[in-house]
Amino acid sequence: MHSLLARGSLVALAAAFATPAHAQLVSQVTRPPNIVLILMDDVGYGDLGSYGVADAKTPHIDRLAREGVKLTDFYANGPSCSPTRTGLITGRYQQRYGIEWPLGSQPDDSTRGLLPAETSLPQLLKSAGYATGLIGKWHLGRKRISPEPTRLR
C-alpha cells in the first residue's frame, strides 16, 4: 500500500511540475542574466546618486543600481584609462602587456595594443550566447599588433 501511495504521490508531483507555468518559471530562472558593464574614467563611488551623492543627478545609473546589482567593494587595477581597460577586458594585469599608461601618451606607442589572439571578456560572453557591443571609448590601441606567424616545418 505504501509503495502504491508513494508512486501515486510521485506521479502527482511530476504532473504538477510539468505544467506550462512551471516550464515558464524554469526558463526564467535558467535564462542567463543581462549584463551591462559601464566603465567610466575619473569617477568614484562618491560621484553617483546610487552611492549617496546629493549634488549630482544620475537617475538612469541609479535605476540600474536599484533594479540590478550594485558593487560596493571594487578597486581599479590602474590609475588611468588604458591600464584599467586592459585589466578588465583581458582579466590580466596591465603589466603583462606593458600597457601601464594611457596609450598615445608615450613616444612610439601608437602601434601598441591588445593582441587579436588574446582571449577577452567580450569573446567569452559571446561564446556563452550573449550579444556584445561597445559604445564609447576603446583606448586599447588603434593598430593591433599580431603575434609572429607560426611557421610550418
Image (cartoon, grey):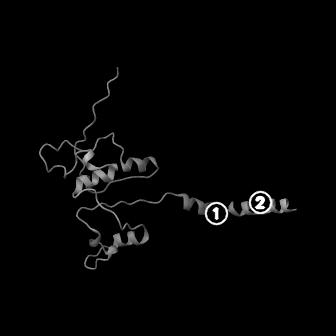
Q: Position of residue 66 (x, y in %)?
A: 41, 72
Mark 2: few/some/many CA within 10 Å (<14, 14-19, 20+):
few
Q: Position of residue 48 (x, y in %)?
A: 29, 72
Between circles 1 and 2, the one closer to the viewer is: 2
- Residue depicted at 30% across the width and 52% down the height: 87
State the residue in front, 79 or 144. Answer: 79
Q: Element under label 2?
A: helix
Q: Element under label 1?
A: helix
- The answer to whether 71 appears left or right of 101 in the picture is right
Q: Which comes before the other along the chain, label 1 or label 2?
A: 2
Q: Which residue was labeled with disc 2?
A: 11
Q: Which residue was labeled with disc 1?
A: 22
Q: Position of residue 143 (x, y in %)?
A: 22, 42
- The answer to whether 34 appears left or right of 136 in the picture is right
Q: Is residue 85 above or below residue 149?
A: below
Q: Position of residue 20 (x, y in %)?
A: 65, 62
- The answer to whether 103 appears left or right of 45 in the picture is left
Q: Is residue 130 above or below residue 116?
A: below
Kind of residue at disc 1? His
State the residue in front, 89 or 132. Answer: 89
- Measured in 3D between alpha carbons, the distance from the residue under mark 1 to the one under mark 2, in whole angstroms, is 16 Å
